């Protein structure tokens, strides 16, 4: 069947493509520049010869980062926080979202209002620290996991996704003798893979990038890699500011660029595997029609 496109549709498509290419370049160009700087020779950086292609291939910045004590341990800590934290968050969010998706649940409207209220108002840093301290979680890995087990935005996405699943499926399962936990495990969760992948990606990015909570609650040997790399960046900044030679300042710039690449590359690699679920989970779970 032939489809006829009007002049207005063609112009609209062209504008969309131009905007998408522009946004892509905004995101891609700084990353390519940082990658080129991190792999370029100090002399080329000093002479401003680096654009988007490395000049005088040099891996010294990465060697220096990898030679820092406890670097790989910090990377292992971050992988632990990301994997375990995302798993806990998905489990807790699912268990909380499923009953809240049922209109016949007593107190459902009040609970939803409390969830929305907590999105905009929080106790603040000091009350949160006092709470974590009173629960004796400071200095333990649970301080990075349990306080962030449920995110309100992710919870609302999952609630709306559960509401989009036909009630007839659950009613048939109840007639067959399956309980609510069985329905959740055998029917709802398999049907909710797009939404779970979406909030799982959000949660994984949060745990991967989180460094401030580690600074407040954790001991040095428990630091995530982002906090570890932040300390490296601060150290190289002081090195570059205090250095009398241009070489030291250039090395500091190169190390900063290598830190950015090292910290963002794993998430960039992970995203394509979840991208096919991402758009569907976000759009289906955002509106209940």
Image (cartoon, rainbow, N blue to C red):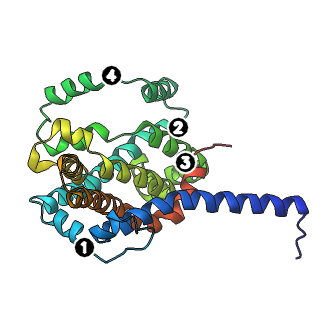
Of circles 3 and 1, the one toward us is 1
Residue at 44% x, 66% y is 32
Position of the C terminus, as image quadrant, is top right
From the viewer's perspective, tell me whether residue 50 is left or right of residue 138. Answer: right
From what the image shows, is residue 42 above or below residue 184?
below
What is the spatial separation of the Cα atoms under label 4 and label 2, in whole angstroms?
29 Å
Where residue 102 is drawn, which disc sits there?
Answer: 2
Residue 203: assigned label: none
Indicate whether 108 appears above or below 81. above
Q: How far, Cα to Cα, is label 2 from label 3?
A: 12 Å
235 vs 2: above or below: above
Q: Secondary structure at mark 1?
A: loop
Tell me the mark number nearer the camera, choosing from 4 and 2. 4
Please report whichever mark, 1 or 2, sits nearer to the chain's N-terminal start.
Answer: 1
Circle 3 sits on which residue?
161
The reply to whether discs 4 and 2 touch (Cβ–Cβ < 8 Å) is no
The residues tagged by marks 1 and 2 sit, at their Cα atoms, a distance apart of 56 Å
Q: How far across and down, in percent of the image, does residue 231 sit? A: 19, 48
Q: Report which residue position mark 1 lands on.
A: 59
Q: CA distance from mark 3 to mark 4?
A: 29 Å
Instruction: Residue 162: give x, y in percent of width and height.
Output: 53, 47
| Residue receiving disc 4 | 123
């Amino acid at each position: 069947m032939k489809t006829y496109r009007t002049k207005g549709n063609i112009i609209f498509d062209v504008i969309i493509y131009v905007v998408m290419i522009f946004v892509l370049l905004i995101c891609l160009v700084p990353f390519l520049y940082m990658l080129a700087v991190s792999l370029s020779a100090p002399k080329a950086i000093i002479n401003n010869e680096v654009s988007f292609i490395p000049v005088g291939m040099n891996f010294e910045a990465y060697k220096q980062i990898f030679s820092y004590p406890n670097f790989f341990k910090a990377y292992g800590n971050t992988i632990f926080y990301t994997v375990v934290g995302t798993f806990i968050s998905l489990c807790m969010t699912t268990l909380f979202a499923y009953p809240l998706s049922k209109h016949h649940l007593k107190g459902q409207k009040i609970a939803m209002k409390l969830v929305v209220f907590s999105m905009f108002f929080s106790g603040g840093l000091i009350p949160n620290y006092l709470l974590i301290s009173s629960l004796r979680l400071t200095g333990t890995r649970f301080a990075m996991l349990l306080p962030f087990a449920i995110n309100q935005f992710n919870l609302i996405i999952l609630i709306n996704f559960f509401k989009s699943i036909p009630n007839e499926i659950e009613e048939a399962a109840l007639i067959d003798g399956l309980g609510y936990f069985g329905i959740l495990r055998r029917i709802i969760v398999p049907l909710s893979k797009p939404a779970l992948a979406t909030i799982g990606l959000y949660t994984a990015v949060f745990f991967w990038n989180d460094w401030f909570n580690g600074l407040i609650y954790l001991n040095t040997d428990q630091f995530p890699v982002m906090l570890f790399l932040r300390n490296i960046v601060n150290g190289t900044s002081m090195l570059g500011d205090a250095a009398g030679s241009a070489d030291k300042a250039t090395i500091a710039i190169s190390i900063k660029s290598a830190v950015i690449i090292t910290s963002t590359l794993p998430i960039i690699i992970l995203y394509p595997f979840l991208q096919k679920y991402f758009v569907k989970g976000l759009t289906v779970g955002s509106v209940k029609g």
